């Protein structure tokens, strides 16, 4: 079974631009969560989607948004990028009878 | 709300020695306690997990013990090797988690050759 995939793996943007990151969960998983991780920090929860519905959202500004498609693939968007948005963005999926979240390799976003 | 604390924040051990990382949670109704390992530049990977009806679980050099009364669980790595160097996390499904895993700051394990 293929794991969680994220694209792109690396991204460089400038302040004020917007960016879209993509996540494909493990086949059969309907829940997708997004996290932001900055150097030396734990994972900060952004939001979680299940069957195209956002079930929970973390404490991030409205510039951070997401969506999920009918095939469970998910995207997150950050508008008006700021320098502080530079981070590793991680996507995780879980589903079926498992309590385990499986992570993708992440997208490294650098804002200049 | 739920809070997860890990100790120590950094642990340096000699190759071949054992390492123990402790995780304390404040208020969890969860019966599932995973440990993740994150290597530099990669996403966290599940290495072992335990359910509350089990006090200890072992997988080769890795073991996890759970004390649900005291609200803490520990990761034990024996015969440490250089590839064990990573950051380890112990997230928890809080009582009011609402589909959100609560993550601590992690423990950086350094294996000295």
Image: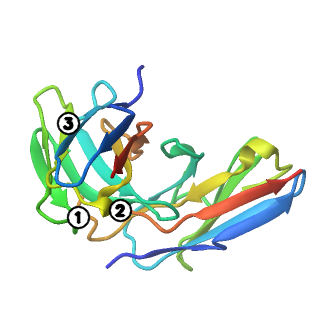
CB-based contact (under 8 Å), mark 3 and mark 2: no
**Residue that numbered label 2 is attached to:** A44
Left or right position of A82 against A67: right
Image quarter for residue B70?
bottom right
Given the image, what chain letter belongs to the residue carrying mark 1?
A: A
**Residue that numbered label 3 is attached to:** A74
Above or below for A9 versus B36: above
Q: B72 and A10: which one is in front?
A: A10
Image quarter for residue B111?
bottom right
Q: What is the C-alpha distance between the residues marked 3 and 2?
A: 18 Å
* Same chain letter for marks 2 and 1: yes
Looking at marks 3 and 2 on the same chain, the residue that comes earlier in the sequence is marked by 2
Q: A12 and B100: which one is in front?
A: A12
What coloring was used for the rendering?
Answer: rainbow
CB-based contact (under 8 Å), mark 2 and mark 1: yes
Looking at marks 1 and 3 on the same chain, the residue that comes earlier in the sequence is marked by 1
Residue at position x 42%, y 40% from top? A103
Q: A53 and A59: which one is in front?
A: A59
Callout 2: SS: strand
Q: Residues within 10 Å of mark 1 (few under 14, many from 20)?
A: few
Q: From the image, which quarter does the N terminus of chain A lie in?
A: top left
What's the mark number on residue A58?
A: 1
Above or below for B39 versus A61: above
Residue farthest to the top, as pictured: A1
């Amino acid at each position: 079974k293929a794991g969680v995939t994220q694209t792109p793996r690396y991204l460089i943007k400038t302040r004020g631009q917007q960016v879209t990151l993509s996540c494909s969960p493990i086949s059969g998983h309907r829940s997708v969560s997004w996290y932001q991780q900055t150097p030396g920090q734990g994972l900060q929860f952004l939001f979680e989607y299940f069957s195209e519905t956002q079930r929970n959202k973390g404490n991030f500004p409205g510039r951070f948004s997401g969506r999920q498609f009918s095939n469970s693939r998910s995207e997150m968007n950050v508008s008006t990028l700021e320098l502080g948005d530079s981070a590793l963005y991680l996507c995780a999926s879980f589903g079926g009878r498992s309590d385990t979240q499986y992570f993708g390799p992440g997208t490294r976003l650098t804002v200049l | 709300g739920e809070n997860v604390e890990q100790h120590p924040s950094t642990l340096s051990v000699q190759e071949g020695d054992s390492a123990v990382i402790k995780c304390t949670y404040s208020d969890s109704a969860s019966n599932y306690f995973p440990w993740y390992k994150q290597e530099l530049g990669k996403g966290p990977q599940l290495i072992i997990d335990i359910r509350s009806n089990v006090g200890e679980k072992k997988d080769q050099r890795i073991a996890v013990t759970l004390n649900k009364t005291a609200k803490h669980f520990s990761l034990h790595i024996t015969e440490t090797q250089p590839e064990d160097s990573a950051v380890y996390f112990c997230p928890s499904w809080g009582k009011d988690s609402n589909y959100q895993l609560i993550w601590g700051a992690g423990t950086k394990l350094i294996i000295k050759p």
